[in-house]
Image: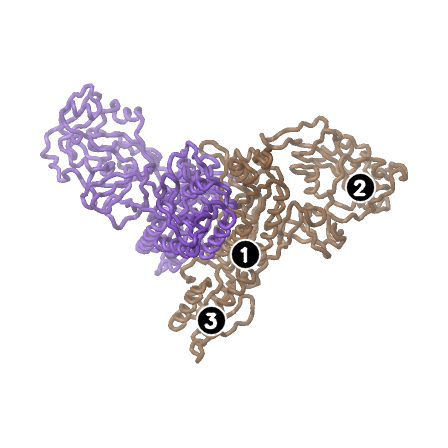
Chain colours: A purple, B brown
Amino acid sequence: MKFSETFIPTLREAPADAVIASHRLMLRAGMVRKLANGLFAYLPLGLRAFRKVENIIREEMNAIGSLEIKPSVVAPGDLWKESGRWDSMGEALLKVANRTGADMVVSPTAEEAVTSIVRDELSSYKQLPISVYQINTKYRDEIRPRYGVMRGREFTMKDAYSYHVDEKSLDETYQKMGKAYRRIFQRCGLAVMPVSADSGAMGGSGSEEFMVGSEIGDNILLLCRECEYAANVEKAGCKPDYDAAAPAAADAPPLEKIATPAARTITELCAFLKTDAKTFVKTLIYRAVNVELDLSNAPGCALLKRVRPAPAAPTVYAEAFFAVCIRGDLDVNEAKLAAALKAGGVSLAADADVERLTGAPVGFAGPVGLTALPVVADETMAALSDAVAGALEKDVHYRRVAYGKDFSPWLVADVRTVKAGDRCPACGGELYEKKGNELGHIFKLGYKYTKSMNARFLDENGASQTPVMGCYGIGVDRTLASIIEEHHDDAGIVWPMSVAPFHVVIAPVKYEGAVKSAVDAIAAGLEKSGVETLVDDRNERAGVKFNDADLIGIPFRIVVGDKNLALETPLVEVKRRGEREARLIPVDAVVQETAGMVFDELVKVG
Amino acid sequence: MKFSETFIPTLREAPADAVIASHRLMLRAGMVRKLANGLFAYLPLGLRAFRKVENIIREEMNAIGSLEIKPSVVAPGDLWKESGRWDSMGEALLKVANRTGADMVVSPTAEEAVTSIVRDELSSYKQLPISVYQINTKYRDEIRPRYGVMRGREFTMKDAYSYHVDEKSLDETYQKMGKAYRRIFQRCGLAVMPVSADSGAMGGSGSEEFMVGSEIGDNILLLCRECEYAANVEKAGCKPDYDAAAPAAADAPPLEKIATPAARTITELCAFLKTDAKTFVKTLIYRAVNVELDLSNAPGCALLKRVRPAPAAPTVYAEAFFAVCIRGDLDVNEAKLAAALKAGGVSLAADADVERLTGAPVGFAGPVGLTALPVVADETMAALSDAVAGALEKDVHYRRVAYGKDFSPWLVADVRTVKAGDRCPACGGELYEKKGNELGHIFKLGYKYTKSMNARFLDENGASQTPVMGCYGIGVDRTLASIIEEHHDDAGIVWPMSVAPFHVVIAPVKYEGAVKSAVDAIAAGLEKSGVETLVDDRNERAGVKFNDADLIGIPFRIVVGDKNLALETPLVEVKRRGEREARLIPVDAVVQETAGMVFDELVKVG
């Protein structure tokens, strides 16, 4: 293809709002253009690379027997009401009423649509397992889209869904997906970190996230220096850093009340009491919404009403408050807390609520004598036998507080934020932190959708059963952008061969006369061998062509000039993008040699 | 691929609302399922055929140098306000506000998005022509979606857009598109009628529709029995069936007023006056909206205000009334009338408006003495010199009415509905009518979007110019459904090879033992040759397998049974879908022979 016949509007500078490399380079290389905040158009060069990523995903999905389907992008709102997500998904769900007033969504994902199709066709265990996928447009109404296609509002996702007679069958498909995902990212030239979503050791996991390290990553990952443990901070656990066999409560000295005027923060209290934050009970009052846990026996919750926000949604408490106790040197991880409470979300309670529930100003909450709301204790609490805690009274604290003696929590859970330096839950090695972007996710969904949407099949004994479900996503745009993040230099993109929009660019010094004839012959030979070739036929200086070739990142550049062509053995220059030195190759051999190198790399990665 | 490993939920019966063959068969063959009114999901078999149609279109677009791009499906409403279509498109445009309150549309087409991209990159005539296309999801909020994917709300369209320095360059691309469209439909096995959108003879047309004949077609086409003339009734013209050189007005006898009590319809008047409908002036009062014509010198319109509904939209009269006169035996075609008035739409005026404007009850309108509104005369009017017309008075008509003597219209235009039996405007042959569905449309758009959205380039002399634009669409789903409409029989679909979801189905009588081994070997051989093969490995009776093979329409069926395999020269049965007789072929030869037949047909069509 000739440069003059394509549409590759390269730019010297990217707009100021493009702060990450992939965003800048996709704009500069003429791969994409912004239509509006979070909405992009792929131009021809960008789409060529995009389709290659898409096809790698498609090939690997087909290879494990997942079947491609194509549900509509605009989906009926009724299905989302059935699953309960019409309400629970919040403002990220783009809702629209059509002209007849029917509720619709612009799909951000398709659990509902696919489950409704499978439900209608499913009758017997013989039809299972079913594994289907789509590679299709999605919309998520991000409040703050940024970083180009890395975090846009509209994007393309490969989303697969599987249905099974039992957990064992689900696990088989889940394992296959995990392997396919590893091959996909490897073929794309990406080093991904498969991150366990379990807080414990590896294996038997019900969820795995595929992360790439990224300075602008919106996930904090905890990785072990010794073993392969890797987890999202929202799930990460650590080896206990306390003596789990704490002194029995009976041996502990009695509670003491002490005045702590002018000392409200833990640091101030430590200084005042000449002690360490590790001996403090930090008590935080949280407000949780849409709590699925049964609170009927929880202190202060007897009068809370359970509601069902949508016909098939689970019953929830719309709002409930909890006192969360954790060791003074640690932080509560709100994602872990929300998971422990089976809550739609948690946030620190307003000051007025804190004062109402604890009967004291903010800063003096503690678990001792607290009856207005349930106490949730982090696992670290159980080791405290001589601790300091707020006394529910202004300027007063307790000391000699012991777990089990002075207070007994309603719920014990692991809600601590694991940090760099903590110990690996699998091997005890030191954990370190890294920021990451999630490119893919495989997840054993269980019965959430099949139950709420009433999918059923008859098992071998003729008994009606609910199938168990898995879901598996990959963001195509984000994968493409991440490839550029990992493969670029100061001059531009350095495409891995597998996803390069063209394999070879031919840059004639001047596209005329003998040079033109040689270029046309080389291009025709390469195209015939299946090498995708771009001929820069523009009437531009060689420097401009070289800069653009580097910017758009084509793996091989062939330079054809009249001097080298006029030699006894006519030569052309072949340079690998990212390498400094070019090789001189006889013009008669260049097609075969270049094609050989291109296919070597395709096979190597593939 | 094994039948048991795919997901092809065939049905014996289609739901009652599926009234056309393609809708019934796509449901029965497990190709699609309905998610909601006008919204469908393609299942694996349907998607395989869909992708083949899509790829034929893609190959032919690439072959003429159009470049594939991918704008977002959700598009910013601001662009639609710039072009004026935010208001003018009406309720078919699905509008949605995102969480920040920004107006968005779910794109039904992409003139705005593509023009905005080209506008931002365009500077010089050297960049032109540009031709780009997408094959992407579209949404049109049809008030009454039906006939399955033939007329759904969400659909996939190939839409191309081209930009040019002048009309000559536009015409070159337009001609190439026309040829590509003919190849696309031919490769899909469809006999399309390219229908001129000009009312005159062929050639130099600015718009061409690609129609397939269909009983449920929403277009009426006029075709000539003698030549290739074909036109949509909304545009069709005909040879004058009157003496254009009518008697001069001066020679005509004077006007006469006659009482016509109890005769209000043309039929009643013909009986009463013992004459023919051809001598009547039928006068209809129309209300037109968003009229772009300049009405400042039109009777009764001096006080009408021109408005600009959107910043860049053309100025229009929001509402205006017209008296339309046509020969008594003819009907007004409202699409032609709207085009002549450059109106957004026309409809018969309400009775109250008729009475107010004509000063008489409904039924007595006529052009003589009518001053309250402009008179639009069909071309047939000019031949009338002794006609009957309403006298703007209850139970009174004029006779001896002559054009030019008794009335002079404000505008003369061709607004008649051409009918079967009328004469071809190109050759004078007899026209006949056919219902058709539009699969594609190529259109010289002119300057509508480039002007309203202010796209500019510098020409060779450095002068700023507006590029001229073309647009070119094909409905992918509708094309697929039309293929089934044309290629099916009582047993099911009869796919053309080029778009068949599989080329061959192998139906073992029982998939076990020697039969299984033979089937697996044949399937492996076919797949290796590039023949897409479905193995019906289900534990079902042969009859069930044969019925499903016929229903899903795979071009070749190979039956492998133990009796034929046990012969000295083991044989298998090969049958072409749609033919009655099977051939017996030695098992050793079946791969080569079948692959040969498959590729012969692929080449023949391609």
User: Which amino acid type is shown beneath numbered disc 2?
Assistant: Met
Identify the residue under disc 2.
B381
Mark 1 against mark 2, which lies toward the viewer?
A: 2
Give the image location of residue A108, x and y in percent.
42, 42
User: Which amino acid type is shown beneath numbered disc 3?
Assistant: Val
Measure the alpha-carbon separation of dots 3 and 1: 34 Å
User: Which amino acid type is shown beneath numbered disc 1?
Assistant: Arg
Give the image location of residue A188, x and y in percent.
37, 49
Work out whether B495 lies above or below B116.
below
Measure the alpha-carbon separation of dots 1 and 2: 48 Å
In the picture, measured across the screen, residue B530 lies left or right of residue B335, that is left
Letter of the chain that mark 2 sits on in the rendering:
B
B444 vs B548, nearest the viewer: B444
Letter of the chain that mark 3 sits on in the rendering:
B
Identify the residue under disc 1.
B24
Mark 3 against mark 2, which lies toward the viewer?
A: 3
Q: Is residue A308 visible?
A: no
| Quarter of the rendering containing residue A152 | top left
Q: Is residue B191 visible?
A: yes
Identify the residue under disc 3.
B590
Mark nearer the N terminus (3 vs 1): 1
